[in-house]
Amino acid sequence: MKVPIIYFSSSGNTKYVCQVVAKGLNSMDLETELIPLRGIKKHPSRIKDAALFGIGAPIYGANFTPNMIQWMKQLPRVNDDKKFFLIDTCSGLSGVALLKARTILTQKGYKCVGGLELISPTRDSVFWTGFYDYISWNEDEIKRAYNFGRLVAKNYWAGKEKFIKSFRVMPFGRILTKLFTYVERPFFKLATKLMAIDHSKCKRCKLCESLCPMEAINVKQDIYFHPEKCMLCFKCMRNCPEGALYLKIYPKAKFFKGPFQIKGYIEPEKLNFRKVE
Ligand SMILES: Cc1cc2nc3c(=O)[nH]c(=O)nc-3n(C[C@H](O)[C@H](O)[C@H](O)COP(=O)(O)O)c2cc1C
Ligand code: SF4
Ligand code: SF4
């Protein structure tokens, strides 16, 4: 059986953590398949057939990202014994995001077997302004992710349904998440006004359109941006080869491109921890 792990990641941290968790599962004889969210939308049967699956997302506005929440909400109800685990990365202000995301699926009959949250090393994956010499994940944190994967697999083989809690709920977390739920839309609406397009630089290559998880960009003869759909993930700005997308307040921002670009990054394949039971 393959365990699909469906993830969204803009600056690479969540993807990296999902890879490490997958490595933990693999070490306990569970095969895994990492599937970007846009991929699973095209092939929904990959989770339909799985007895266990994982979901990984960054925290935006003290909640799982809007695209992941939308996808989770449209999943069908189940009556069989379908298990899932949740992974998120954040800057330390996650409120009760993980518990809230868990409820979306448990209400539909899925059984949650674990939740893992890691704080990204930069604490700010939005920009990489050049202040840092290098950024890397703390090795102990990565071990925690690896061991989480091992424990999920161990319980799976033992037929145990115990919830593995590898995250902390911050004080006033519930209030924070609720507050963000109310201010999120107006905040994004305001913030997306800061996004700007340099029409003279744009080569109409459509890369931004194909990468945007919210269908907030259309490229035809010209490029059209729909701020009401945007969740400010910066994926378009990070990847535009012409530098045609930028922020009005900070046109010279270097967008942080995730751990893959950074000195000190350990390839998940090269992680070789001693076995931890
Ligand atoms: C629009 C936006 C909103 C965010 N909101 C929060 C937040 O409310 N709480 C938090 O702890 N981190 C927040 N973050 C930080 C991300 O959760 C964090 O950097 C995460 O590791 C990014 O994951 P990725 O590298 O996989 O994209 C936010 C980031 C962005 C871009
Ligand atoms: S990725 Fe950049 S150059 Fe390509 S269509 Fe988008 S804005 Fe234009
Ligand atoms: S328009 Fe850009 S920042 Fe907004 S959701 Fe799409 S890719 Fe992300």
Image (cartoon, rainbow, N blue to C red):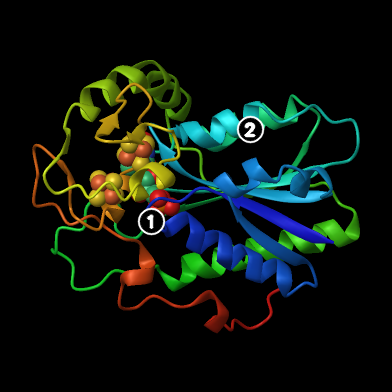
Q: Is residue 269 left or right of residue 219?
A: right
Instruction: Where is residue 193? Give x, y as percent.
Output: 19, 26
Number of the front mark, 1 or 2: 2
Give the amino acid at mark 2: Met
Quarter of the image with the C terminus in it? bottom right
Q: In terms of image quadrants, where is residue 274?
A: bottom right
Residue plotted at (41% across, 47% down):
211
Q: Residues within 10 Å of mark 2 (few under 14, many from 20)?
A: some
For the question of whether residue 19 can be seen, the reply is yes
Q: Is mark 1 within 8 Å of ligand 1?
A: yes
Q: For residue 120, which numbered disc appears in the image?
A: 1
Instruction: Where is residue 227? Give x, y as percent.
Output: 29, 25
Figure check: 246 above or below 2: above
Q: Secondary structure at mark 2?
A: helix
Instruction: Where is residue 21? Give x, y as percent.
Output: 61, 63
Residue plotted at (89% across, 40% down):
81
In this view of the protein, which residue sits in the foreground, 46 or 30?
46
Q: Secondary structure at mark 1?
A: loop
Question: What residue is pinned by disc 2?
Answer: 72
Q: Is residue 24 left or right of residue 191?
A: right
Residue plotted at (55% across, 31% down):
69
